[in-house]
Image (tube, rainbow, N blue to C red):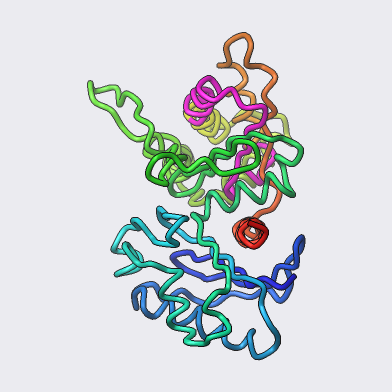
Amino acid sequence: MRISVFDIGGTFIKHGLFDSSTLSELHQIPTNAHLGADHLIASLADILRQELQEGPLDGIGISTRGQVDTEAGRIIYDPPEVIPGYSGTCLRQELQSALDCGVTSDLPIAVENDGNCAAMAENRAGAAQGFADCICVVFGTAIGGAILSDHQVYHGSSFSAGEFGMMRFPDGCGGSMYYENFASVTQLVQLVSAADPSLANGREIAAALRAADAAAVTTPVTGAVDAWARRAALGLSSLIHIFNPPCLVLGGGIMESAEIFRRVRRETQALLAPGFEAVQIRPALLGNRAGMLGAGYLTMDLISG
């Protein structure tokens, strides 16, 4: 099977070929998001035309930012300042039109939100393999995620389930704030920078934490990370109590740090009520390949009907 897969982000479009289980011919191009949706579609079509010259495709899988109507292959909403004109774009139809080739008119095209694609990949071949149900939470500049039930993405009534970052928490002043404005990696950096202004990103924070743990010392940085881990745990424990999943997968580059992951897992487990302790909390395994892999698996499902 030869499936062309894409992962569309605000900065880069990652691309490869999927053959039922693995990726090959991986590369990425700039999204040039400021040029808008039409330019993005033209970029995808250029890559696909070249691939079709090299041999037939069995399908196309697209993992993309934004809320996605998977039945229509349409972008419901994406912040307009990122890719102008992307919201409302029927990506499947526009891509077929851009290819303008009869052989592709009926080519299966799966379009899905990138968080849902990543969760599908982790379930099929990553940290959640072997579990029929799982919850995935991704920590980055915002917080996203996905819900899988019986190995399938749960989309909700309007294809928008899994927006965990929009959970509300008290702000301490009588109001409320989004979970992602309370526990995203952006908030981690702010907390740590207040303790050590020389640390400006997640990678630097992880390195400083690793050094402190290796020396078995407590520093202002470890205290700040622990405070953030407790914030993250509030949302994660709530999700566990709502869904009672057998497996919770934590993704995002920050969770590649064993020291940070361990703290978040510890703080989350400390908040669990009796009867919920059996949940397996695991770091995501597939990294930045997860979106493309998930798009490939979803395209396979579409082909098989």
Where does residue 97 sit, x and y in percent of width and height? 43, 81
In this orientation, which residue lies closer to the viewer: 248 or 94? 94
In this orientation, which residue lies closer to the viewer: 72 or 249? 72
In the displayed structure, does residue 41 sit left or right of residue 150? left
Provide the residue span drawn in magenta: 232-260
Identify the residue shown where x is 62% and y is 45%.
Answer: 206
Q: Residue furthest bottom?
A: 53
Q: Main secondary structure of the magenta part?
A: helix
Q: Image quarter for residue 191?
A: top left
Where does residue 92 sit, x and y in percent of width and height? 46, 69
Q: Is residue 38 above or below residue 201?
A: below
Q: Which quadrant of the figure contains the C terminus?
A: bottom right
Q: Is residue 209 above or below residue 68?
A: above
Q: Is residue 297 above or below residue 222?
A: below
Q: Residue furthest left?
A: 174
Identify the residue shown where x is 42% and y is 69%.
Answer: 91
In this orientation, which residue lies closer to the viewer: 62 or 24? 62
Q: Which quadrant of the figure contains the N terminus?
A: bottom right
Where does residue 184 sit, x and y in percent of width and height? 45, 41
Magenta stretch contains residue 57: no
In the displayed structure, does residue 70 sit left or right of residue 219? left
Identify the residue shown where x is 49% and y is 84%.
Answer: 99
In this orientation, which residue lies closer to the viewer: 35 or 120? 120
In the displayed structure, does residue 176 sit left or right of residue 203? left
Identify the residue shown where x is 44% and y is 83%.
Answer: 98
Where does residue 265 sit, x and y in percent of width and height? 63, 28
